[in-house]
Amino acid sequence: MILQTALLIGLVVFSVLAILLKDLLRSAIALAVSSLLLGIIFFRMGAPYAGVFEISVVAGLITVLFILTIALVHKGDEVRESRLVNWAFPLAFVVFLVIDALVMKGLIGKVPALASGAESGTFGEVLWKGRTLDLVGQIAVILAGVFAVLALFRKRDKHE
Amino acid sequence: MSNTWYLYLFFSAALVFAGLLGLLGKRNLIKLFICIEVVGKGVSLLLLSTGFAKGSMLTAQALVITYIVIEVSLVATALALIINIYRTTRSLDIRGLAKLKG
């Protein structure tokens, strides 16, 4: 439990660093580290498939995409951020953490989460038989993403 | 079990709030997208921890994997869009897009 709490604290710290760091490359790397920590948390919760996806896809592929984009738009990374954010963000975040710690305990009994019956079968059976429509949706979303990227990088005709 | 669930809910709420604060205050397009990613991390932690607490881990895992696939598609499209915006405005500043007002 102590290790899990330490991992969760690390996850929040690296996520906040990803938001607050000025250098975009460092932000992307901090985001990758937080994804890695989230993957380890998933493993320790007994969700190895979600953990593998989190580490390989989110910490790996998405970080590569981010770094590639940052390399392509390198000159544009000197955006002047508001000074207000630098001191207001930590202040608001700490205030929220205090409220979160006080309120969340009371909310737990009221969160409308269904208590399902005991699950049977393997993960494969649940994914392929129980959530078949999700998989169809995933295929549709991937195709939509591919077509969107193709449309965005389409070469312009000379006549346009 | 309730204490463990409390811990996960506490941290996922913190992640979602940090992402939302960043979305409110930041001006860099890539930074804004990183904030969306942080919100997404909070949501996937919430999904899996609720499955963990309620004993439906397999369904929760299936949902998280679906979310990750959607996230990849979203990231690819959004980053392509950001590159195109950069080509047009030569800047990643979100305020530059205000010029597009009709």
Image: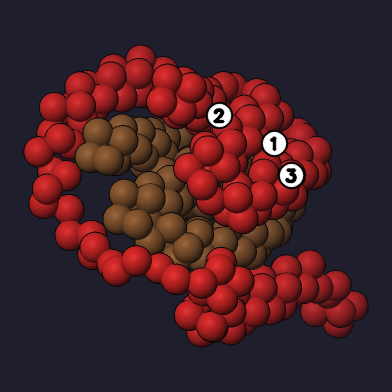
Circle 2: residue type: Ala
Q: Is residue B3 above or below residue B82?
A: above
First in sequence: mark 2 or mark 3? 2
Mark 3 falls within which chain? Answer: A
Task: Estimate the spatial distance between the alpha carbons at disc 1 and disc 2, rounded to whole Å.
Answer: 18 Å
Circle 2 sits on which residue? A18
Number of the front mark, 1 or 2: 2
Q: Give the colour of chain B.
A: brown
Say whether disc 1 or disc 2 marks the residue closer to the N-terminus: 2
Dot 3 crowding, Cα within 10 Å, few <14, some 14–19, many 20+: some
Looking at the rendered structure, the kind of residue marked 3 is Gly
The quarter of the picture where residue B10 lies is top left
Residue B36 vs residue A105, the one in the foreground: A105
The picture places residue A41, in percent across and down from the top left corner, at 52, 37
Which of the image's four quarters has the C terminus of chain B? bottom left
Q: Is the residue marked by circle 2 packed among few (<14), some (14-19), or many (20+) residues within 10 Å?
A: many
Q: Quadrant of residue A66?
A: top right
- Say which of B100 and B4 sits in front: B4
Against B80, residue B26 (above or below) is above
Residue in the image at 35% along x and 18% along y = A90
- Residue A76 is labelled as 1
Chain letter of mark 2 equals A
Looking at the image, which residue is at 15% across and 35% down? A105
The residue that disc 3 covers is A60
Q: Secondary structure at mark 2?
A: helix
Q: Is residue B93 left or right of residue A106?
A: right
The image shows residue B52, relative to residue B34, as above or below, that is below
- Tell me: A158 left or right of A110: right
